[in-house]
Image (cartoon, coloured by chain):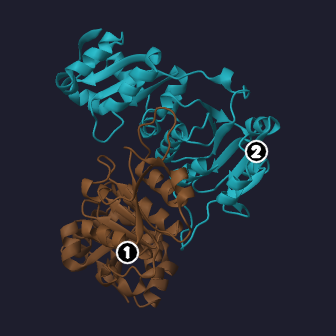
Chain colours: A brown, B cyan
Amino acid sequence: MLTEIIESANNKKLKLLKSLAAKKNRDKLGLFTAEGKRMVQEAAKYAKEGIEFVAVSCSFAKENKNLVKSIDEIGVSVYTIKDNLFNQASNTVTPQGIAAVVKIKDNSKADNDLSDISRVLILDGVSEPGNLGTIIRTAEAAGIERVYMMKGCADIYNPKVVRSTMGSVFRVPFVRDCDVEMVKLLKSSGFKIAVSSLGESIGIHEYAESLDKNDKRAIVIGSEAFGVSDAVLGLADVCVHIPMQGRVESLNAAVAAGILMYLL
Amino acid sequence: MLTEIIESANNKKLKLLKSLAAKKNRDKLGLFTAEGKRMVQEAAKYAKEGIEFVAVSCSFAKENKNLVKSIDEIGVSVYTIKDNLFNQASNTVTPQGIAAVVKIKDNSKADNDLSDISRVLILDGVSEPGNLGTIIRTAEAAGIERVYMMKGCADIYNPKVVRSTMGSVFRVPFVRDCDVEMVKLLKSSGFKIAVSSLGESIGIHEYAESLDKNDKRAIVIGSEAFGVSDAVLGLADVCVHIPMQGRVESLNAAVAAGILMYLL
């Protein structure tokens, strides 16, 4: 339903939109924002039931009448906001003029059910939002069936992470705020825990060759600065590294994760 | 040689430093900047002869006396600049307070000598600076022996590209501003030209298996938005793709490049 134009900075919807930049508000309200044309379209396609409302700037509404109409037609409320107010609420440097407010999924029930999956990714302290989003996007493409994010990772609902996923946030099954118990459960359920490490380890090509196609696999990626935590390292079945020539000290975390997911 | 403190916005060294943000000035003067502690240390290690001078902010000089002394001791002039002036000349949001001005290498003589190399990367329109730098970094680690950048790529000497290489800019052999003649030369010299393409193509795992270890290989990565140009596509021996599951439309360019370089 298209509503009147929001012209007051005190409007409740506008204030809600703004407030979701902070994790504590996202967690309290169970909501996050997906900003930009592409992301709102992905939300409408893959998380329609979860959309609380869509906000557009006046300019965007004028220039994208068909898109706004199509969102309205699937039963989502669309609020139009004065350009300067929209831009103040935006989380991007150059706001496109559209954002969706979406419910955070409660996937706690799925956490412990490992019966139907055999390839998972564990992220232990990936803290750079762009890296985290790109890894989630690559994980979907690589056929990873569940992504576990341990405490210390960036929040997947951080606006920059959401954008970097290019929509995968709405499709990849994931679990937030895991602790080491989750890794123990995976291990005791027969998953081979392969930890990416710059320390003593075997090359990924060699490890890939040793795998049987029926092996259940968990790949662990550590923090950009500190690697994998000792608690998780202690549960590793194998430590693996990506062979590096030249004088490179490390690969970009998202690139390394991509290579690992496509090789293992 | 440690010099007096630069306190005037009209100082020549300061103006030079500032001017190198623009490609036309870099090309005219044959100089570029490497900013940040890590990058200056890499320059001092791998491109010492090429350093024209190093500029540091007063605060940086005070807090990093040993580093500044070590740069001075290898015979590089260090200029100290008032903090606010340094920050104005900086190309980063949060300046660390140190930058080196470095000579652009003339590697035109090496362009056509293909006798000793067998693995090259061709970048055809990679335009996002962060992607380009990350790809150069990964190329070094993956053992790529030369990177060809075609017209339309971001400039490798763009400050953001330089930073994203994490030092590989000083070590990876590369050629800038190539055109399609370079690809023809590689092809006629026996390199198998494998073009990454979302169109009709074979999966990379399949192509990797078909390769003989003595095959000379060229991997081509296209622009983030438009892929590989028709001219280069016409020279392809094979088009390859990274298999993707889920609903992902594409991978991040730097991630895709990393997977291709480590698999082929």
Residue B170: image location, x then y, percent: 49, 27
Foreground: disc 2 or disc 1? 1
For the residue labelled by badge 1, is the local secondary structure a helix, a strand or a loop?
A: loop
Q: Residue at x 54, y 26 (%)?
A: B27
In the picture of the structure, the residue carrying the numbered disc 1 is: A189
Residues under numbered marks 2 and 1 in contact, where contact means CB atoms less than 8 Å apart: no
Residue B140: image location, x then y, percent: 53, 37
Is A112 drawn above or below residue A24 in the view shown?
below
Task: Judge left or right: residue A203 versus residue B179.
Answer: left
Is A156 drawn above or below residue B147 in the view shown?
below
Residue B264 in sight in this render: yes
Q: In which quarter of the image is residue B38?
A: top left
Q: Mark 1 lies on which chain?
A: A
Q: Residue at x 30, y 12 (%)?
A: B72
Residue A1: image location, x then y, percent: 38, 90
Q: Could you tell me how far apart the alpha carbons at marks 2 and 1 are, in whole angstroms?
A: 45 Å
Question: Which three-letter amino acid code belongs to the residue tagged 1?
Answer: Ser
Q: In which quarter of the image is residue A198?
A: top left
Question: Which three-letter amino acid code belongs to the residue tagged 2?
Answer: Lys
Badge 2 local density, few (<14 within 10 Å), some, or many (20+)? many
For the residue labelled by badge 2, is the local secondary structure a helix, a strand or a loop?
A: strand
Q: Which residue is drawn at 80% across and 38% down?
A: B190
Residue A86 in sight in this render: no
Residue B222 marker: none
Q: Quadrant of residue A147?
A: bottom left
Question: Observer-nearest residue: A190 or A220?
Answer: A190
In the picture of the structure, the residue carrying the numbered disc 2 is: B192
Question: Observer-nearest residue: A114 or B202?
Answer: A114
* Residue at the outermost right position: B188
Residue B10: image location, x then y, percent: 31, 19
Task: Judge left or right: residue A150 versus residue A74.
Answer: left
